[in-house]
Image (spheres, rainbow, N blue to C red):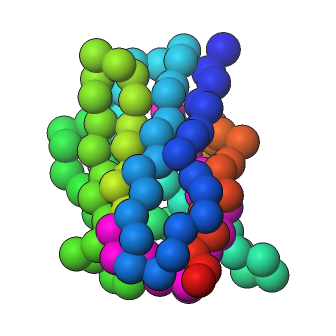
């Protein structure tokens, strides 16, 4: 059984930082692409960042230079370091692991609110 548990969300002022964590059980994260997605109220879920099994990363244009995705295989944990946060980054952030062309698993999400 695959489980993803996110943590690290919260309320932060514009310009602040947060680090999200996602602990994955049931799969070896070093073998798959993992990533972070977000969904703001009234909007579709969108990709924020991914990291492949080979370590290649990909970012949504609006977060490039501000967010960093990484992973610790020994801890089976994927991270999203978010710096210089903006109000438009406010959303529920979800962790994802893609185990096949048609199969992926999601966490329950963690709320990030950027507001003064």
Q: In the image, is residue 1 part of the stretch drawn in magenta?
A: no
Relative to residue 69, is residue 33 depicted above or below?
A: above
The answer to which image quadrant residue 103 occupies is top right
| Residue located 28% across and 58% down the image | 68
Relative to residue 24, is residue 50 depicted above or below?
A: below
| Residue located 51% across and 25% down the image | 24
Q: Quadrant of the N terminus?
A: top right
> Picture coordinates of residue 58 (x, y %)?
29, 63
The answer to which image quadrant residue 31 occupies is top left
Q: Quadrant of the C terminus?
A: bottom right
> Picture coordinates of residue 60 (x, y %)?
39, 75
| Residue located 67% across and 58% down the image | 111
Asked whether the viewer can see residue 50, the reply is: no
Asked whether the viewer can see residue 29, the reply is: yes
> Picture coordinates of residue 47 (x, y %)?
50, 66
Residue furthest to the right in view is 42
Q: Is residue 104 toward the left or the right of residue 36 in the image?
A: right
Looking at the image, which is closer to me, 44 or 108? 108
* Range of residues picked out in magenta: 83-100
């Amino acid at each position: 059984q695959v489980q993803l548990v996110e943590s690290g969300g919260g309320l932060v002022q514009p310009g602040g930082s947060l680090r999200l964590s996602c602990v994955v059980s049931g799969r070896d994260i070093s073998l798959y692409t993992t990533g972070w997605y977000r969904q703001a109220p009234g909007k579709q879920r969108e990709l924020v960042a991914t990291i492949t099994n080979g370590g290649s990363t990909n970012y949504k244009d609006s977060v490039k230079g501000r967010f960093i995705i990484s992973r610790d295989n020994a801890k089976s944990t994927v991270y999203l370091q978010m710096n210089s946060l903006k109000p438009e980054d406010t959303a529920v952030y979800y962790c994802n692991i893609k185990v096949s062309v048609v199969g992926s698993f999601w966490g329950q999400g963690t709320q990030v609110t950027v507001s003064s």
